[in-house]
Image (cartoon, rainbow, N blue to C red):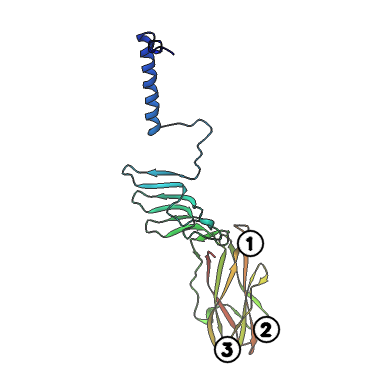
Amino acid sequence: MTKFSDRLPPNMETIMRELEALRGEVREMRAARRLEAATIGGGGITIQGGAIVLKDADGNEIGRLGIREDLNPGPGGKPQSGFILRRSDGSVAFTVDDPDGGTTGLKQFVAMSDPQGHIIMSNDANSGFGLAAPNVTGGVFYSTNPETMPGHNGTGLFQVMTAEVPVFHPRYRVSVAVSCPASGSGAVDLRVNGTSQGVKSVPTNSFNHYDWVLDGKALSGGSLGTVLGLEILVSRTAGTTSDYIRVSPNSIIATGS
């Protein structure tokens, strides 16, 4: 059996070296508990099943990247990952998530919000194409006086106005006002790149609004920024050549799906 004296350091110098080594290990352990500052030269950091959480000086969470425990889970109860960034007042500024969660699949979207909680910009999660917000309105003042509205008195569809619209949203609603005299009736059509989107009947003695809802994703072939050519055409279906079917633009509104 080894004697106790044989296990002692041979001299005081050896004892001091071992004490200094222990001090270094303690310093490293303390540093591991709280990392004041660090630089990663390569390799990166991997966090699996957790999140990077940012807090202000008062301990309030202002940012989180990774598992979002505040969200409904996804399919199979799997925790939803995402991103959230808050302003200093606690209001949400930016998110990547699906607030409703989902049992069949998540539809996460990127959203920017104002301090009141209104989403001012986001992609369209339902269609997976373009913007859901903001809704862009191409509203115009339109004439309610038939005498000042362009029109046509022939029996064939005739182009009375055109427009060009770049596609950045999945849905577009086109609205026009159409006037028809008491002695005639007519029809109005919207064409996109030369293709009819549905002819609508215009009854006798009327002043009505007519709408078409366009599928921006389908019409653009899924290519953001594609410019669509729009045409409004009208025709007289009853009456005489003195009966003009007149039309005025109302609005083109771009929305999410």
How far, Cα to Cα, is label 2 from label 1? 32 Å
Indicate the amino acid at tag 1: Ser
Find disc 1 in the rendering and name its residue: 220
Work out whether residue 109 or residue 157 is closer to the camera in this orientation and state it.
109
Look at the image and tell me whether residue 143 can be seen.
yes
Residue 241 is marked as none
Q: Residues within 10 Å of mark 2 (few under 14, many from 20)?
A: some
Indicate the amino acid at tag 2: Thr
Look at the image and tell me whether residue 35 can be seen.
no
Residue 155 is marked as 2
Disc 1 is placed on an element classified as loop
Q: Position of residue 228 (x, y in %)?
A: 62, 64
Disc 3 is placed on an element classified as loop
Find disc 3 in the rendering and name its residue: 204
Residue at screen point 43% across, 47% down: 64
Residue 180: quadrant of the picture: bottom right
Residue at screen point 52% across, 35% down: 44
Work out whether residue 150 or residue 119 is closer to the camera in this orientation and state it.
119
Residue at screen point 56% across, 90% down: 182
Q: Position of residue 84 (x, y in %)?
A: 44, 50
